[in-house]
Image: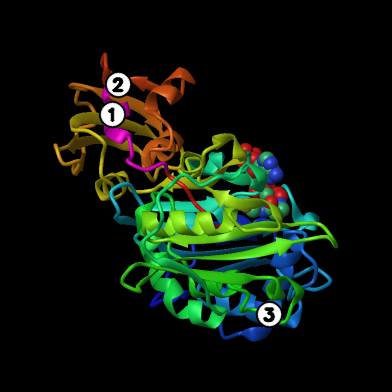
Amino acid sequence: MSFDPRSIPVDPAASAALARHGLEYRLLDPDDRPAMLAWIEAENRGFHHGRPREVDRDYDLSVASERRVHGVYDPAAAHPEVPVATVDGWPTGLSVPGGRSVDAWAVSAVTVSPTHRRRGIARALMEGELANARNAGAAVAMLTVTEATIYGRYGYAPAAKAATVTVDRRRTHWIGPDAPGRVQFVTADELREVAPSIARRSVARTPGEIDRWPGILDRALGRVDPDGDGARRVRTVRYDDEHGQPQGFVAYRIRREPDQPGFVEFDFLVAATDDAERALWRFLVEQDFVSGVRGLLRSIDEPLPWLLEDPRAVTVSDVVDHLWVRILDPVEALTARRYGGAGTLELDVADPLGHARGRFRLVVDERGRAEVERIQDADAAASGPGLRLGVQELGAIYLGGVRPSVLARAARITESAPRSLALADRVFAAERTPHLSIWF
Ligand SMILES: CC(C)(COP(=O)(O)OP(=O)(O)OC[C@H]1O[C@@H](n2cnc3c(N)ncnc32)[C@H](O)[C@@H]1OP(=O)(O)O)[C@@H](O)C(=O)NCCC(=O)NCCS
């Protein structure tokens, strides 16, 4: 990544808000190892993880060094060198409908020490990240969340879902086509060479996916701590197409009790083609001496049930609002994606924090390409079809994960002219259900 984490100015508003509580908002230098290690300690504690082992610290350090890392410090604390709150952020691509990506800012590692809760620290950090995102030129900010009640107040809304997909092995009879390529076991090191390219192409196929950073692939393939218990259980399989080109992979584990069949679990099935996706699913669900297969953070719209004689072999559960999106620049964001139908819509966007506030004209042509402009004359009367909505609602419909008319039924969007909602439903439709398959 070519991003210099320290290239953006420290947000003066966040500094001032924290200083009012006697706290210091500090941008960390990735080369300051003691400060980075204290931050990693605080972040692990904030998420209620155990104290990190050396191997985990080294991994966290390598990942955090590529990001913009902030800590909040209490000079009066017993250990003033350990931050009482953490956050990090970095610029990355977010896939949007149509196969392109929009410049986004990912926010992660949001924690506040239990000793310092509910005095506005999270708010200062979150507003600081929105400032960082804008300074980095991002059109949207985004995060994955532990609780769904925290981030709406900053303008984020759920935009892509994920679910657990469980398959009953006894009911599995494959009726889908045979894949023309082959599935084979490869070592994690072999897979690591081709994984970034497969992941890149896989991300581009699905709105809601974000660019993978190197560390997440190492972690998924069990290369971070190869002799650790978790990593030793990871099996890695690659799909090569009929020309011998790697097009997909899965990293999975089998849990098993003595004398019992095993249970396959995975959270990393990456496919650059439909053939690869089908072949890897088939490999997983046709294994012998297993009772079932469970995939985590899968799409709510998997084709798998249509590939089996008995679609009830597949259960979709634990559907979650996984990716939360916050639109910062409606012109850039709306121009980046492709649309499901032609038409012109005027969007009147409210945003209490100001970033996305305004009126915008979205003109979509027959090929689904958009031209978007800000309507400069604030007093101009609305002409033609349009929607009045908040920045959260704009984020929710942005990737096509929810229809505008559903939000209208929830009284969260109003149409400014008759039949605007029907048009908006057609225009904002995406060809693929948005989905995010990782935590970040
Ligand atoms: C979530 C967390 C970061 C909030 O930190 P905080 O400094 O106490 O939050 P603030 O004092 O800035 O509160 C900001 C607002 O969020 C609200 N809020 C904070 N935590 C909340 C929660 N868990 N659920 C719902 N609302 C919450 C506050 O009431 C406040 O609302 P207001 O601005 O409308 O008055 C903190 O509780 C934490 O570290 N939790 C554990 C780790 C975690 O879950 N991180 C989130 C990762 S996605």
**Is 36 contained in the magenta span?**
no
On whether ligand 1 comes within 8 Å of the CB at mark 2, the answer is no
Identify residue for label 2.
422
Give the class, few, some or many, for how many residues have Cα within 10 Å of label 2's Cα (few <14, many ≥20): some
Residue 170: percent from the left, percent from the top?
A: 66, 45
Which residue is nearer to you in this view: 217 or 148?
Answer: 217
Label 2 near label 3: C-beta < 8 Å?
no
Identify residue for label 3.
225
Q: Give the quadrant of residue 47.
A: bottom right
Residue at image position (32%, 19%) is 415
Q: Which residue type does callout 1 highlight?
A: Arg
The circle on residue 426 is 1
Rendered-image quadrant of the C terminus:
bottom right
Label 2 near label 1: C-beta < 8 Å?
yes
Disc 1/disc 2 C-alpha distance (Å):
7 Å
Q: Give the quadrant of residue 27.
A: bottom right
Q: Give the quadrant of residue 218.
A: bottom right
Q: Which residue type does callout 2 highlight?
A: Ala
State the extent of the magenta-drawn residues as a range. Answer: 422-433
Precedes in sequence: disc 3 or disc 1: 3
Q: In this rendering, does residue 35 appear at all?
A: no
Residue 376: percent from the left, percent from the top?
A: 20, 37
The circle on residue 147 is none
Q: For numbered disc 1, what is the local secondary structure?
A: helix
**Is 432 contained in the magenta span?**
yes
Precedes in sequence: disc 3 or disc 2: 3
